[in-house]
Image (cartoon, rainbow, N blue to C red):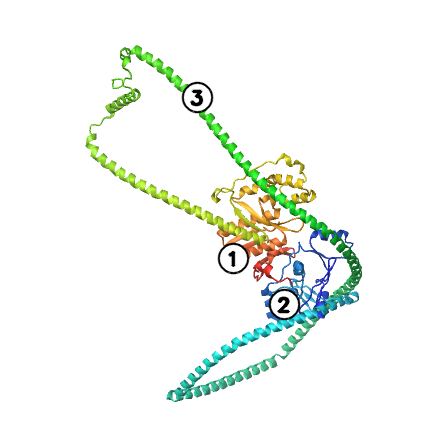
Amino acid sequence: MGLTCVVESFSLWFHHVQSLCFDDFLNVLIGSKKMRLYNVIVDTEVTSKKLLKSGQLQRRTTIIPLNKISGHSMNQNTIHTAEQLVGKDNVQPALSLIEYDRELRPAMEWIFGQVFICRDMATARKVTFHERIMKKSVTLDGDSVDPGGTLSGAMIVIGAAAKGLNVFEEVNKLREPEEALARKELELAVVDQEITNLAKVAERFNSLKEHLDLRKHEVELVRQKLQQTSHHRYQEEVDNLKESIAKLSEKVVECTNSVADNQHKVNDLEAKLKNVKALKETQLQTAKNEMVRLEKKAEESSKQWKQREQDFESLNLEIKELQTSIETSRSQIAALEEKLVELKVQTEQNQGDLDKAKTEVLEIKEVIKKQKELINHQHKEIQLKIQKKDKLIKNNSEYELEIKKMEYEVTKLKNELNNSHHKVKQLSEKYEWIEREKAYFGKPNGMYDFAENNPEEAGKRIQKLKENLEKMGRTLNMRALANLGTVEDQYQDLLKKKKIVETDREKIVNVIDELDERKKVALREACKKVNQDFGSIFSVLLPGAKACLRPLEGKDVLEGLEATDKSKNTEAAWLEEIDHGHLDSVVACFKKRFSLEFCSYLFKLMPLLLVSSGCEILEELLTLLVKVFVLERYTFGSWEDVWKESLGELSGGQRSLVALSLILAMLLFKPAPLYILDEVDAALDLSHTQNIGNMLRSHFRHSQFIVVSLKDGMFNNANVLFRTKFVDGMSTVQRSVQHVVPRPLSSLNNKRNH
């Protein structure tokens, strides 16, 4: 029999109970004080703020924003342990008894994800306080048991709340045909499976029966042969004697035990007769102690009864408040239904405008795409012009330096020419034969053929010979000829050693080149592995997003990254409302100034917006260019895959996840046995914290982590949890062991919606 839970969010959302009966499960939900049936579920926290501000709520209401709630269901090991402990028919997870829409899953998991529904209080206590479960339980009577030791009783459904249950009965009537069809299909599947299993069993049965008959026949033949031998007869006699010995031994033991018991009873009776007075005093003292204990228990029961009376009064007040709230809610529902009709009419009118706007958006997308291609082309041309300009400036500097060198050479040659004329004049005055022989200077095949005999070289040779002659005159060793043979042998030996050294040098150079190549291969493999792990880790930390490491255009991985600093164009001054480098502010301004002219200016300035976000410091720390792939939603609900060109386009939380992913990917390349993380999730929300825990369990299977955290998302992934708290003014540490089975990420998408 089905059950529908009502949730208020300007419309009624129905969820159906599958397994328990209507009355039992309804009492569970209404009877438990912490399991509220009436909560407002909204899409974002912005909607919740608007409801609290302008919703005219007449009573205290709990609002659940779907984008901020991060619930989780129990793992299968915990459920299996509970079913083994008390039986599958006595306990079931509350979440498995409810059908709900896919988008409501976070809210359902947050409310019902960690709760068991038990048949009675004894079952609930066993399940809740079991060391491998430690989850909250609610009985069919509405009593709830918390692992922290809190026990709360059921509420009584009266008045308007009881009348409101008729809605569930109407929904159940609508579900009966659907459930009947499901039962028939299930029975058909069971019958088909039984037919298939019986066919296989029959085939195996026939085979095993033939095999058994053959073995029985062989055993019978062997038995007949054994019975015909004398050994068999002797064996039967030995077995009979062993049975007789065993029976007699048992009888001896029984008699011995009986004698010992009787002797013990005799000794006890003799001791009691001797100590009758002491025995009476002991029994009297025991009775007094029992009386004191019962008096204390009576006082405690009286205190508990008074507390129950106070709880009863508060519950009565809450029931009256709920009845008033129900009446107010009905009035609000009627008003909302009227408003819903008006909104439907307005929606139909706006549909035409929406189609027209979508057409305009497509046209503008084409214009934007062309503008972006044009900007990229112009940017490349500008870079080429800048490179050409730098090259020309460099060549100009080289030419200027060369001109200065030439001017210096000319000046030097002029000075040498003047010196030469002066020296020739001096030589002519000093040596008279120069004037006489001057006519023969430079003539070929003559004494003064300067082309054949260079005067400068001849002068240098003469000077060198004079110097050698002077040195030899001072240091000439007349006994050197006697040592010539030894020196020649040493010379030949040195030549051999030189050859060996040159050969070894060539081998060392080859080894260095080989090691250099291995280093390059290892670096590329490390980059590939880190890139792969980086993308995998980032996809787990930020589901629906991808990331990769890529070198700069035209450069190799070994050359790393060159960070550039570009100034902001003065043409962007009129866009003061744009927070440069933050894509959210650009999109907000785009929606505000939705026009073709603005699109042209915006994409003209887009390269400057990408480099002026202040993220160049982070980019300089990275040795590779980080490209992040995310899903960006456009104005009218269409989605498109976009690669971010720089880290400046990401939010602060996304950049934190990118940095954390890159660090963990580099650590994963050569993992250590132990890591210590100190509040790495402090700036992240609960969903990202839980993703960090899942990522550590899936990627670092051979490492241990000591994690300091203050968020439940990280606690749930810990094998051993140490909690610190104050007890009587002193800090204490409590250790608990958790059995966590990591759930694969693919199961989140493959799991059914209901």
570 vs 323: above or below: above
Upstream in sequence: badge 1 or badge 2 = 2
Q: Quadrant of the C terminus?
A: bottom right
Q: Quadrant of residue 167?
A: bottom right
- The residue that label 1 is drawn on is 701
Residue 110 x %, y %: 66, 59
Of tags 2 and 3, the one toward the viewer is: 3
Q: What residue type is labelled 1?
A: Arg
Residue 20 seen by the camera? no
Distance in Å between CA atoms under marks 1 and 2: 31 Å
For label 3, the SS is: helix
Residue 502 visible, this angle = yes
**Relative to 108, does residue 630 appear above or below in the rendering?**
above
Q: Distance between the residues labelled 1 and 3?
A: 74 Å
Q: Name the residue under label 3.
A: 407
Q: In the rendered view, does 117 fall on the left or right side of 252?
A: right
Picture quarter with the N terminus: bottom right
**Contact? badges 1 and 3 (CB < 8 Å):** no
User: What percent of the width, then of the height, locates residue 664?
Assistant: 53, 51
